[in-house]
Image: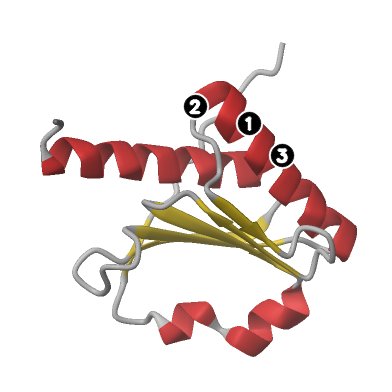
Amino acid sequence: MPSTSSATSNSLALAQRAAQIAIDNKAQDVVLLDLRGVTDMTDFFIIASGTSDTHVRSIGQHLIEDMKKRENSPVHHVEGLEKGRWVLLDYVDFVVHVFHPTLRNFYQLERLWADAEQIPVETVQESRA
């Protein structure tokens, strides 16, 4: 059984990778929140915005496909992919929220989880061969 710190660092690495995939797919205002010590529900939230319903759906679909293919990390539960207003992807150790800008402004998850530390999203320029 892996140690807790090893599992947590792997969770952070996967959350960072998911944030990077969102950025690679032109998501806007990508935020990574560290919820450890704030809640037992999950370790991290990734919050991002798309520019339209279609863009929100596309970001969600790319996250599902790329995380499974590249990281061998299949999504545990999906909500909202059909409508594209708010896509929730539950990977157990982290949860990705992709919002239409209007809904992100309405729900203000960053404000709701203001006690969580914001982790800088490390952007890596990836060459797509």
Give the quarter of the figure containing the N terminus: top left
Task: Give how far across and how far down residue 121 sits, in percent.
Answer: 44, 49
User: Which residue appears at 27% of the width and 73% of the height?
Assistant: 39
Residue with the mark numbered 1:
66
Q: Residue furthest top?
A: 129
Q: Nearer the viewer, residue 124 or 82?
A: 82
Q: Nearer the viewer, residue 90 or 128?
A: 90
Name the mark on residue 71.
2
**Mark-to-mark CA distance, 3 and 2:** 13 Å
Q: Count neighbours of disc 1 (C-alpha within 10 A) and say few if under 14, some if 14 to 19, many if 20 or more.
A: some
User: Which residue appears at 29% of the width and 80% of the height?
Assistant: 115
Instruction: Please state which amino acid type lies under the numbered disc 3.
Output: His
**Mark-to-mark CA distance, 1 and 3:** 6 Å
User: How many numbered marks, from 0 up?
Assistant: 3
Disc nearer the start of the sequence (2/1): 1
Task: Give how far across and how far down residue 108 sits, in percent.
Answer: 56, 84
Find numbered disc 2 in the image and state the secondary structure of the residue it sits on.
helix
**Mark-to-mark CA distance, 2 and 1:** 7 Å
Q: Nearer the viewer, residue 91 or 9?
A: 91
Disc 1 to disc 3: CB gap under 8 Å:
yes
User: Which residue appears at 42% of the width and 54% of the height?
Assistant: 94
Residue with the mark numbered 3:
62
Instruction: Please state which amino acid type lies under the numbered disc 1.
Output: Asp
User: Which residue appears at 31% of the width and 73% of the height?
Assistant: 116
Q: Is residue 36 left or right of residue 28?
A: left
Disc 2 to disc 1: CB gap under 8 Å:
yes
Instruction: Please state which amino acid type lies under the numbered disc 2.
Output: Glu
